[in-house]
């Protein structure tokens, strides 16, 4: 946020004013609030970034919007479709902007990939495969809290789903998912899923029990594009395009993709322009996520 143009970090709120003060001191933030309610009552706050545990996203995004503030809500947008729809309804009713915080979508690398797809560089997209995994140690962690909508699907699987929708430029109509649920925590630790689109399929794997990977591959009927380190790009991000017997590598600058999403929200607030990804998009994403979670527990193919 501090690197983002048009953004001023005005305050930090926490349930513990001591914790908030420590954070404020480290990052030179002028205001400290000992509760979320205190921050929402401050007329100097225009917009709020909500990075709370998954299970609290909808509740506090709604409270933020009703307090007259705009909101950037961390992924996942909500824990259920009903919650996501309630947030969207509140945004429409209050006239405030709300966006799900998928920072990767603003990186020039992915915008280039979608341009190549739309330009026919690899033909019609038929397959997408993505992966986002890392090893999470077994200790107290909100990601392992079922009551807070924890689990690999909701933590990192959301990126794979978001990427599949982004790359197909469409919505899936059915999904299937298999997952290993932890007997102690009750959350999915490793999952594999299939999204069925009108013109092809997206597959993904995600979870907390295998080494770090964050990549995707797009396969068309005339070629493919490989994007290593997709969601957390390195200092010299690149993509590989294979088509018509040629293999090309394109490199990109590495801007702070978090700053880019904050700048987009700020620009829309200042100019009145529409968000590139609004609450409607977030509800569509949540519908896919909940269908996957249902499929993982039922063992059946689920409609979105």
Image (tube, rainbow, N blue to C red):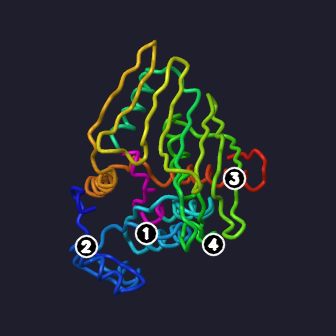
Marks 4 and 3 sit apart, C-alpha to C-alpha, by 18 Å
- The residue under label 1 is 65
Under circle 4, the secondary element is helix
Answer few, some or many: residues within 10 Å of disc 1's Cα (few below 14, many 20 plus, some between 14 and 19): many
* Dot 4 crowding, Cα within 10 Å, few <14, some 14–19, many 20+: some
Q: Is residue 140 magenta?
A: no
- Label disc, if present, on residue 179 of the rendered structure: 3
Q: Which numbered marker is on residue 147?
A: 4
Q: Earlier in the sequence, mark 2 or mark 1?
A: 2
Depth check, mark 1 against mark 3: the one in front is 3
First in residue order: circle 4 vs circle 3: 4
**Crowdedness of circle 3 by 10 Å Cα count: few (<14), some, many (20+)?**
many
Residue plotted at (36% across, 32% down): 112
CB within 8 Å, label 2 to label 4: no
- Distance, label 1 to label 3, CA atoms, is 35 Å
Asked if the residue under mark 3 is in contact with the one under mark 2, i.e. CB atoms within 8 Å, the reply is no
What is the magenta range? 91-106
**Upstream in the sequence, badge 2 or badge 3?**
2
> Which residue is the site of mark 2?
10
> Marks 2/4: CA distance?
31 Å
Compared with 102, 146 (above or below) is below
Q: Which residue occupies 28% across, 75% down?
A: 11
Residue 146 image position (x, y, % from top left):
64, 69
Q: Residue 148: percent from the left, percent from the top? A: 58, 70
Q: Answer yes or no: do the residues labelled 2 and 1 have beta carbons within 8 Å?
A: no
**Which of the two marks, 4 or 3, is nearer to us in this view?**
3
Tell me the distance, in whole angstroms, between the alpha carbons under discs 1 and 4: 24 Å
Left or right of residue 125, residue 225 in this image: left
Pinpoint residue 282: horizontal percent, then vertical percent.
51, 53
Q: Nearer the viewer, residue 290 or 276?
A: 290
Mark found first going from the N terminus, 2 or 4: 2
For marks 1 and 4, give the one nearer the viewer. 4
């Amino acid at each position: 946020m501090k690197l983002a143009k048009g953004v001023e970090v005005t305050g930090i709120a926490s349930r513990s004013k001591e914790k908030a003060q420590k954070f404020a001191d480290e990052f030179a933030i002028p205001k400290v609030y000992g509760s979320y309610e205190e921050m929402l009552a401050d007329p100097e706050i225009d917009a709020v970034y909500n990075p709370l545990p998954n299970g609290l996203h909808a509740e506090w995004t709604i409270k933020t919007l009703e307090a007259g503030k705009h909101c950037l809500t961390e992924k996942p947008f909500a824990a259920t479709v009903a919650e996501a729809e309630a947030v969207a309804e509140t945004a429409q009713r209050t006239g405030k902007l709300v966006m799900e915080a998928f920072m990767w979508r603003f990186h020039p690398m992915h915008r280039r990939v979608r341009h190549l797809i739309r330009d026919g560089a690899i033909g019609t997209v038929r397959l997408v495969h993505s992966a986002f995994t890392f090893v999470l140690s077994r200790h107290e962690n909100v990601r392992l809290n079922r009551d807070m909508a924890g689990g690999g699907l909701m933590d990192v699987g959301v990126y794979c789903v978001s990427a599949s929708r982004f790359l197909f430029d469409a919505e899936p109509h059915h999904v299937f998912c298999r997952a290993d649920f932890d007997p102690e925590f009750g959350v999915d630790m490793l999952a594999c899923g299939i999204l069925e689109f009108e013109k092809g399929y997206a597959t993904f794997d995600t979870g907390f029990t295998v080494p770090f990977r964050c990549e995707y591959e797009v396969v068309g009927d005339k070629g493919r594009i490989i994007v290593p380190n997709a969601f957390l790009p390195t200092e010299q991000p690149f993509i590989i395009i294979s088509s018509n017997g040629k293999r090309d590598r394109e490199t990109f600058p590495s801007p702070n993709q978090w700053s880019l999403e904050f700048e987009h929200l700020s620009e829309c607030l200042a100019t009145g322009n529409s968000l590139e990804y609004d609450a409607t998009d977030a509800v569509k994403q949540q519908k896919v996520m909940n269908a996957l979670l249902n499929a993982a527990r039922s063992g059946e193919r689920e409609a979105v």
